[in-house]
Each structure stands twice: as structure tokens, then as C-alpha cells.
Amino acid sequence: AQSVTQLDSQVPVFEEAPVELRCNYSSSVSVYLFWYVQYPNQGLQLLLKYLSGSTLVKGINGFEAEFNKSQTSFHLRKPSVHISDTAEYFCAVSFAGGTSYGKLTFGQGTILTVHP
Amino acid sequence: NAGVTQTPKFQVLKTGQSMTLQCAQDMNHEYMSWYRQDPGMGLRLIHYSVGAGITDQGEVPNGYNVSRSTTEDFPLRLLSAAPSQTSVYFCASSRSALGPSSGNTIYFGEGSWLTVV
């Protein structure tokens, strides 16, 4: 079975500063990796996903993530955050094979708070 | 442009009551699933379905029943609600469970906030 650990439960940052939200996963087989964002009292929105190929993945709203297979990590980064980026961010994985694509295992979530 | 529709959005139940959370998708997706979200625990898979008539348990199935009589609908039933089932519930769907082939995006509903008192 796979597992996902988001290393920071809360990340405070000032507006226009860079941010990194950390995600590590554990799996004995190949996985697909996802980052979702959830704004207060709303549903989940896909930021980006790694399926295969280039390890640097660019997503929406200026976010990017890098897949590091040797360190089993998929950290999310943004070079300059805005107040509107304040939200909870979830890292998720699914097995790369069989009928497991939609069976996501989520991390605990990281609350990003951007201060003016 | 409906996507994945969940109803109700908010519900308060008394302990022991039963209810059904509805999930419908209009994209002819084979794969549908239910998650619950609890603070500090992320989202956890309750039940899933790879097609009409086929369902299976996820990580936290106890206290919940599902059925999939049509491709479009995947209701989640709480037979006897308990305070531990207070949570936010998300339904998700994708065209297939076989992998990220072209266009096989996983879509989430807007969530259903359930409080059991």
C-alpha cells in the first residue's frame, strides 16, 4: 500500500515571497502524483499532476512541482505568492497500473496562509 | 457543464437517523468514488465503483453502503448515523480506472457537509 506525508501542516508566508510545500510518498510500485488545492468551504481543484516523462511539472496559477524518484518526493513550489493563494493544499498518489488510477491516497494537507 | 453534482450541500442528522448523499455525473464516466475529509487526515476513500453494478470497499467503509445501478449515479447511504461520521464528503469520477489516458481526468464534486448530533 502507498502512503503520503505532507511534512508541514501549516505554512505562513508573506505576499510575493517564494513558497515550497513538501510532500513525500511511500510506494513499492510506480505511482501517479497529484496536487490539489481547496479554498475555504469549496471543493478540490487540480493544480498539477505527474504521470510520466519530465520530472518538472507546471500547473495552474504559477505553481510547479518536481518529481524526485530517488527521494520519493513531489514538492510544490511557487516563486511569488499572492493573498489569493491562501488555501489548503493536498498531495495525492495513485498506483500506476491495474484499475487503481482513481483510487487516490491523500496526504494530511498543508494550510498555506499568505500575509500582506 | 454540470460535471459531478453532489446533494445536499449541507445536512444535520441526529444520531441513529439514516440518509443518502447523492452523487451524479453527466460525463458517462465508468469510475466513481466517495471520500470523506476530516481535519488533519486529508481525504480517505470510503467506497468506489468501476462501473454499473460493481462496487468495492475503500479504506474506511464501515457505516456506509453504496450501490451503482446506473452509470450516472453513485449514492452513499448512512444507515444509522453516528457522530464519528460528521465530516465533509466528496464524490469523484473519471472516465476510466485504467490510467491517465488522454482526457482521463479525475473530477471532484463540491462536497457535502454532514453534521451528526
Image (cartoon, coloured by chain):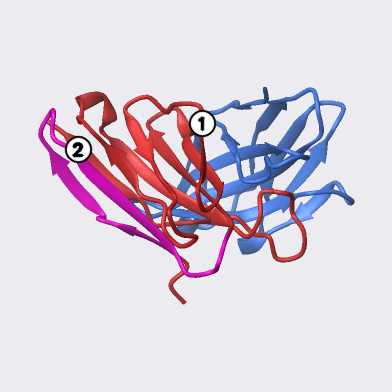
Chain colours: A blue, B red
Q: Is residue A109 rendered to the left or right of residue B61?
A: right
> Callout 1: helix, strand or loop?
loop
| Whether residue A65 is situated above or below residue B95 in the rendered picture | above
User: Could you say where residue B40 lies in the image, as x and y percent from the top left?
Assistant: 43, 27
Can residue A64 be seen in this snapshot? no
User: Could you say where residue A98 lies in the image, as x and y percent from the top left?
Assistant: 75, 40
Based on the picture, tell me whether residue B6 belongs to the magenta stretch: yes
Q: Nearer the viewer, residue B26 or B91?
A: B26
> Callout 2: helix, strand or loop?
strand
Disc 1 marks a residue whose amino acid type is: Gly
- Labels in figure, total: 2
Q: Nearer the viewer, residue B29 or B88?
A: B29
| Point 50% across, 27% down: residue | B59
* Quadrant of the rendered image containing residue A91: top right
Name the quadrant of the C terminus of chain B: top left
Chain containing mark 1: B
| Point 49% across, 29% down: residue | A9
User: Could you say where residue B16 lies in the image, as x and y percent from the top left?
Assistant: 13, 28
Q: Which residues lie in the magenta part?
A: B4-29
Identify the residue under disc 2.
B115
Q: CA distance from mark 1 to mark 2?
A: 22 Å
Q: Residues within 10 Å of mark 1 (few under 14, many from 20)?
A: some
| Whether residue A44 is situated above or below residue B115 in the rendered picture | below
Residue B58: mark in rendering: 1
